[in-house]
Amino acid sequence: MCEKIEKVNSWLSAVFGDQPVPHFEVNTRTVDILYQLAQSSEARCSDTSLLIEDLKQKASEYQAEGAHLQEVLLQGVGLSYASLSKPASDYLSALVDTAMVLGVRDTSLGSFMPAVNNLTNELLEAEKSNRRLERELRALRKRLGATLVLRSTLQEDVNKSVKSQAVESAQAEERLLNMDFVTAKAKELANRRERAEAQLVSRNMDKSITHEAIVKLSEEVTALKQEIIPLKKKLEPYMDLSPNPSLAQVKIEEAKRELAAIDSQLEMNMDFK
């Protein structure tokens, strides 16, 4: 633990330099985290130092090779960069820039051709990947269109279902209110009927004047009226005959008695009604 704390303090001092190190809570977790950061930082710094040294070495090699080529050109051909014409200088600069873009070690044809071939292969792969991505994009757009149409249809169905449910809910509520009203009315009528029956019982009402009794008497009166009709038809043939005074008188008296009895029964029934 103490070794980790010393390493962390040393790393923090190197990181912040002349600035004071911020205060932090010293515990096992914070020390472990800072120790891991210190190790990662040192490993990264070591890798960076190696890379810098390698780049410096390559730069020195390129400088030495450039100086050698300049000396060869100057001594062998008698040319220097300052003695070149402007087009030649421009071509040389373009050649150097191309070599830097391609990342080749020198400007020889043997270095340029593999680099150009690599770039061509990368371009072909990029175009191939681009065509594949375009096909996938078209397929995605097609699926997206179908999905949007389906979503629109589903949304319309949902809206219709919501409206239908709202209407059905309103109808159900209305039916419930009507049922409550009918139930309450039926209960009220039953109570009124019970009170009316109790009042009739308390007043010793004659059952012969009830609605059922009156309906029955009316049916009996109608039946008696129907019985009178054939009797009247029996008397019709005798109305045109010259009557035998004695026999006619007897028949008339019998008919009068029958009519009187029927009229009496009819009046009695009518009185009950």
Image (cartoon, rainbow, N blue to C red):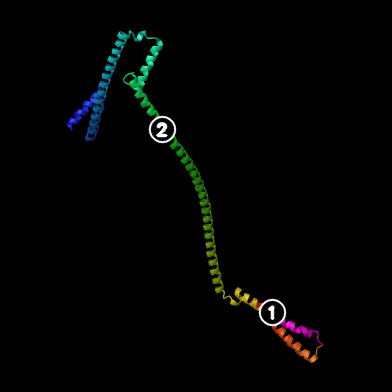
242 or 183: nearer the viewer: 242
3 or 267: nearer the viewer: 3
Circle 1: residue type = Gln
- Counting from the top left corner in percent of width and height, residue 17 is at 25, 22
- Counting from the top left corner in percent of width and height, residue 259 is at 72, 83
| CA distance for labels 1 and 2 | 111 Å
Vertical relation: 89 (above or below) 113 = above
151 or 162: nearer the viewer: 151
Q: Quadrant of residue 220?
A: bottom right
Q: Magenta residues?
A: 229-241
Identify residue for label 1. 226
Vertical relation: 76 (above or below) 165 = above
Discs 1/2, front: 2
Rendered residue at 32%/9% (across/down): 77
Circle 2: residue type = Lys
Left or right: residue 72 versus residue 259 is left
Left or right: residue 77 versus residue 203 is left
Q: Where is the C terminus found, in terms of image quarters?
A: bottom right
Left or right: residue 129 versus residue 160 is left
Residue 16 seen anywhere in this rendered image of the structure: no
Q: Does 234 lie within the magenta span?
A: yes
Q: Secondary structure at mark 2?
A: helix
Identify residue for label 2. 128
Rendered residue at 37%/19% (across/down): 98
